[in-house]
Structure formats: C-alpha cells, structure tokens
Amino acid sequence: MQFNIRKTSVLIALAFSSAAAHATDGYFQHATSVRAQGTGGAGIALPQDGLAAATNPAGTAFVGARLDLGVTWFSPDRGAEIVGNGGGADGALNGNGKRHFFIPELGYVRAFSPSLSAGLAVYGNGGMNTTYNGGVPLFGSGKAGVNLEQLFISPNLAWKIDDANAVGAALNFAYQRFEASGLQNFDNPYFTVSPGNVTNRGTDTSTGWGVRLGWSGKITPYLTLGATWSSKIKAGKFSKYQGLFASGGSFDIPENFGLGLAYKVQSALTVAADVQRIRYADVASVGAPLANLQSAPLGAAKGPGFGWRNTTAYKIGAVYALKDDVTLRAGYNHTSQPVSAGETLFNILAPGVVQDHVSLGASFRVAANGELSVAYTHAFSKTVRGASSIPPAFGGGNANVRLGENILGVAYAWKL
C-alpha cells in the first residue's frame, strides 16, 4: 500500500479539528502544549514534552521516548463598542455567541540511536472566533462573525551533534478552516472584486507546507541557549471567500522566529525566557490596512485586510521540582499590540488584542511511566479604543474592541 502523507495528514487534521479557535499572541497560541502553557510559552531552550518541536525541533533530542496527549479548554470574552457614528450604529456588541472551545494536542518521540530522534507533533497553531448573534449593523444583517482554525501536523527529526548541542527540523503541514457571516454590506461590486464570495458561504478549507528549524546548546552546566525559525507558509486560497481576502482569498501563515535561554538556578529550579517575532504584516490578508479600500476593493491583490502589525512576544517561566513526583510551573507572557487604534473597525471580527498572560501549572507522576499535567492561563482583558477608525462613508466615529481569555489544559504523558 502506498503511503500518502498529505492524505494521512488531512485525516488527522479532520480528527483533531474541533472548533479550536482562539487568540493569544495575536492569533497564534502563546504555548503549544499543556506543559509549555505552565511556563508562559517559554520553551525554545526548555523542551518539556513530545510537542517540543512545535517550538524548537532541536528539543526533540532531549525529551526521550514518550507519548503526550492533551486537551485545552479555551474561553474567550470578546466584544466591541461603536461610538460617535453618524449612521446610528452606536452601541455595545457582544461577540460571545460561542464561549467554549477545545484544542487537542499530540506529541510522540522515538529515539533511533543515541544521536538521532524522530517525532510527530499535532497541535493548534492559532485561530480566531467571533460570534455576534445580534449582528454588526455596520457590516450587514443577521448573525455576524468569523471562525478561523489552524492546525499543524509536524513530523520532525533532531540530531545531537554532541552531548551539549542539537539541531532539528520539522516539516509543518498546515490545515486551515474559515467561515464568515453577516458581512452583506461589503458583498457588492463597489466593495469587492468578487460579489457572492464575501460572506455566508459556509466553511472553506485550505492547506499548506512549511518548515521549522532549530538549535539548542548547553553553553555551561547551568545555561542552555536555543534558536528557532519557521518559514512563511504559502497556503491554498479560500475560494469561497475570494471576495473577502486579498489576492483572491489568500491567507498565508506568517514567518516567525525566536531566541530562548534556560538557566538552572539550583538543582530543583530552572528559569527560562523566550523572545519571539511574528511577521503578521507580511501577510496581505492580515496586515494590509483598511485604508487600501480607497484604491482597491476587497479580494484584490492590494485590497484591504485587518491592518495587523508585526508583533514581538516576551515569555518567561519557571519549573520547580517540589518532590520526585511533583513539578510546579509558573509563567508570564507579554506581546506587543498587533491592532492599532486606526484599524479597529474590521477587527470587530478579529479582536486579537490581549497582551498580558499569567500561567500556573503542575505535573504529577501517577504511575511508573505515567505523568498527569495541568495548566491554567489567564489573559487579562484588553481594550483598544479606536481613533478615527470608522471611515466617513460608514458614518464616522470609532470602534473599540476588547478581548480577555481563560485557558485550562490537561495532558497525560507515557514514557516509552
């Protein structure tokens, strides 16, 4: 039987895609496993489980043979307010038509030799959901909102150059789902190059491929450094929404890269820190400003997007071995603001504006080769207030957008 990795990957994606729509560092997850959630996402130089390759594939070399399965409950609180609008659209908007999401994760690592390890990481890379059951009058009629889900399937290899250094590579298969509703006011030849392909078209899907590369090295007995880079993923177009996204429905996944360190303060305590850059502005459908609508309609090559800026995320975490069978974690994550005050109108649909997260986590050995991990993250509510963000053609005024989050993850690991 011929093995087809693309078909197999799609089947895995379908099995795992369960409304995993969320937003933390922009629309990327702040952490890609339950253990990493506990350290605020810091993990470039601190591999903790079989999903280490989602952050830095070199980490696969240091976690041993294991299987990790987990699920994260994600509950965002999102909404908006229209003020000073000459068209009578002022009022509060509640985007919480759906409040509960579940994000699965899977990590598997096998050592083929003392220097070569291989793994598979399956995780939610990012997403966004808003559901305004009462609609958004400036956009159209009926229930309004978007649902974006991104899931990665990443087979990976890591090679130990020596006892202190390793390099790794992961092949990232991305599976995306998208749906938009309630945007009828834009679904006409004045605003879009493709009327009929802007809103209420049901769920569309796309796929794409990319790579992630990484290095990890122990510089001293106490200090480990790491570096990672993930390519931009050129994904297939959302053909059902070719009148909404720039370049006929294009929605690529941005390049990102980072540096990290882990320092063993004492035998029981390790502190880690990461800095990660995400280049949202280089993806037209995400980064193009609303002002482009003055010269190019939605769906055009230079059409408008959400006006997101590139962001930098700062992550710091600590791991403390309280006892042989109990490990505690804590972390903090801060990201720069992707949404400017002048770009809040379209971001009623995508208010990825939270900036500060605090996390707590723990692992408990419950069997000779089994360990249960839990983590809780709170993303403090953030509001971005508009500044001349609604064009005069829409009645002027401003849109203020907000988001807060609660995240709870549970995972179980088997050492093989």
Image (spheres, rainbow, N blue to C red):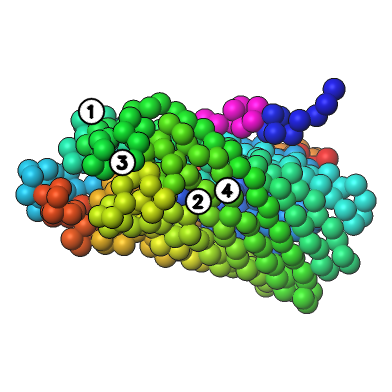
Name the amino acid, label 3.
Answer: Thr
> Tag on residue 192?
3
Q: Residue furthest bottom?
A: 220
What's the distance in space between the residues labelled 3 and 2, CA to CA? Answer: 28 Å
Residue behind mark 2: 28
Q: Is residue 412 left or right of residue 302?
A: right
- When the figure is inspected, residue 386 is found, relative to residue 138, above or below; the finding is below
Provide the residue span drawn in magenta. 10-22
From the image, state whether disc 3 or disc 2 is nearer to you. Answer: 3
Q: Position of residue 187 (x, y in %)?
A: 27, 35
- When the figure is inspected, residue 39 is found, relative to residue 364, above or below; the finding is below
Q: Is residue 245 left or right of residue 255?
A: left
Residue behind mark 4: 234
- What residue is rendered at 48% in x and 45% in y? 251
Q: Position of residue 174 (x, y in %)?
A: 60, 42
Residue behind mark 1: 142
